[in-house]
Structures are given as structure tokens and as C-alpha cells.
Image: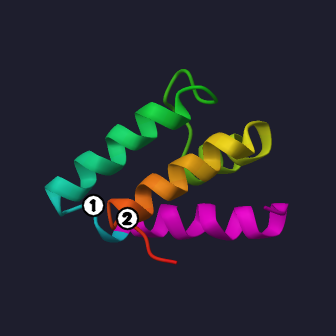
Amino acid sequence: MNFEHMTLVAQKISFAFEDQYFDERKRNIFIALFNKYLLSVDTAGTMEPYDALVLLGRKDPSEFDLMVKEMKEKELISD
């Protein structure tokens, strides 16, 4: 995945998280996935989701792809 496409996907995930924040079930799934995948690049958990997503995509593209796949399977984001 090229950098430009990865940043668009990161933005899509970030917006989906904000849009679905008040759906407690979905919010909890997002948080669980963020904890699973983003803590490797944001150990303090203080970064904005978008920034942590981009950093993950740059440092470990395969993990980023796995996270995106899992989010699609859980219907948090679409293609």
C-alpha cells in the first residue's frame, strides 16, 4: 500500500471512530483494536488515532493491513 493510500485509510478509520463513538459496542471494538495494534507505536496511548495509524502504517505496513482487515470484518469500516 502506498503512503498516500495508507493516509487516506487512516483518515477513514479516524472519521469512522469519531462517527461511531456514541455506539458503545462499536466504540469498544475500536478501542480494543487500537490497543491491539497501536500500542506498539504509541506506548503511552497519548497520540491522536490518526497520527498513530499513520505511524503504524509507516513502521509496520503488514500490521496496519491486518488491522484494516479486522476492522472491515467487524464492519467498522467499509471498502
Q: Farthest residue toward the bottom?
A: 79
Q: Position of residue 62 (x, y in %)?
A: 69, 43
Side of 74 where 77 appears, left or right: right
Report how far apart the C-alphas of labels 1 and 2 lie in the structure: 5 Å
Q: Residue at x 50, y 63 (%)?
A: 13
Front-most of residues 19 and 62: 62
- Going by the image, does 62 lie left or right of 28? right
Q: Residue furthest left?
A: 24
Q: Magenta stretch: residue 8 in it?
A: yes
Above or below residue 22? Residue 39 is: above
Q: Amino acid at mark 2?
A: Glu
Q: Which residue is mark 1?
A: 21
> SS of the residue at dot 2?
helix
Circles 1 and 2 in contact, beta carbons < 8 Å: yes
Report the number of numbered marks: 2
Magenta stretch, residue numbers: 1-18
Q: Is residue 50 above or below residue 45?
A: below
Q: Is residue 60 left or right of residue 64?
A: right
Residue 18 — which label?
Answer: 2
Res 8 quadrant in image: bottom right
* Image position, residue 53 (x, y; %): 61, 48
Residue ID at (42%, 58%)? 71
Q: Residues within 10 Å of mark 2 (few under 14, many from 20)?
A: few
Q: Residue at x 43, y 64 (%)?
A: 72
The location of residue 23, given as percent across then percent down, is 17, 63
